[in-house]
Amino acid sequence: MRLGAVIITMGNRPDELKALLDSVARQDGAPVEVVVVGQGVKVTGLPEGVRTVDLPENLGIPGGRNVGIEAFGPGGTDVDALLFLDDDGLLERRDTAELCRQAFAEDPSLGIVSFRIADPDTGETQRRHVPRLRASDPMRSSRVTTFLGGANAVRTRVFEQVGGLPGEFFYAHEETDLAWRALDAGWRIDYRADMVLLHPTTAPSRHAVYHRMVARNRVWLACRNLPAPLVPLYLGVWMALTLLRKPSGPALKAWFGGFKEGWTTPCGPRRPMKWRTVWRLTRLGRPPVI
């Protein structure tokens, strides 16, 4: 199975990027072809054989990754699966690529594999990095309904069938949008605790646009993908959860601004999932109302 890797960067972590590339090059088995996408920067000084795409502007996380996908041919079809890795991450083990090959080969219906993210100093995995509601045991692998954007592998036939990431999202929830479309097309998603990306512990709110993007894209996610009766239920639950978390005044203002923006701006094509997919998500432990 041919593997490629897509890494997007803003050019501000050259040492971490080099370490990541070294960890990809050390993988067992056939070499993994790598494309690094510069988000509004020219990427230089990379190891021989690593291809680069320099974008004139920052297209956001999904937009940059879509460019990386197309660097492997239409829909990434020059390879069988693509790894998506954060530029400040590091593959802990040498057999991660081989584990990916094995997982996809053994299960033809497996479309996406979500890696475990662990802090390089403590080894701990943040609860938010376990893509299921029952997240207390990050060492338990399981079938899931979404995946981690900066530590995963996707079979390129998924992109061929359901399309790429929603570029208009820019940041936040683009993985769930793709996951729901993949699940609706019949693909499976696995969380694998033995496939590890080392990544420093961070808070998502470090991004200045976090609260606005999270709220806006939550509305877009629902309006694009959910059957009409579930849209207000899903968004109502998330509004209640947001208020229960008692964000600061400025954060709450940004959140409601993003929520309004989600309703007043185009969200892209609407393709509501089948009700049997709703039931499938429910059986997997995460009904699409939370």
Image (cartoon, rainbow, N blue to C red):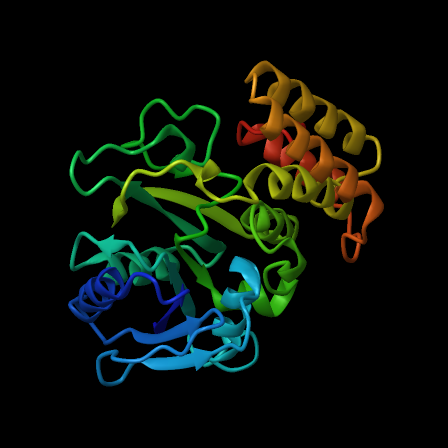
Q: Quadrant of residue 103?
A: bottom left
Q: Quadrant of residue 266?
A: bottom right
Q: Where 28 falls versus 33 (above or below)?
A: above
Residue 177, position as x, y percentages in the image: 62, 49
| Residue that appears at 23% across and 66% down | 24
Looking at the image, residue 26 sits to the left or right of residue 5; the answer is left
Q: How many marks?
A: 0
Residue 225, position as x, y percentages in the image: 73, 45
The foreground one among 227 and 188 is: 227
Residue 199, position as x, y percentages in the image: 28, 46
The foreground one among 70 and 246 is: 246
| Residue that appears at 41% across and 65% down | 10
| On-image quarter of the N terminus | bottom left
| Residue that appears at 59% across and 36% down | 211
- Residue found farthest to the front: 250
Q: Where 262 falls versus 140 (above or below)?
A: below
Q: Is residue 116 visible?
A: yes
| On-image quarter of the C terminus | top right
Q: Is residue 2 visible?
A: no
The foreground one among 175 and 252 is: 252
- Residue found farthest to the bottom: 48
| Residue that appears at 27% across and 64% down | 17
Q: Where 138 falls versus 50 (above or below)?
A: above
Residue 198, position as x, y percentages in the image: 24, 47
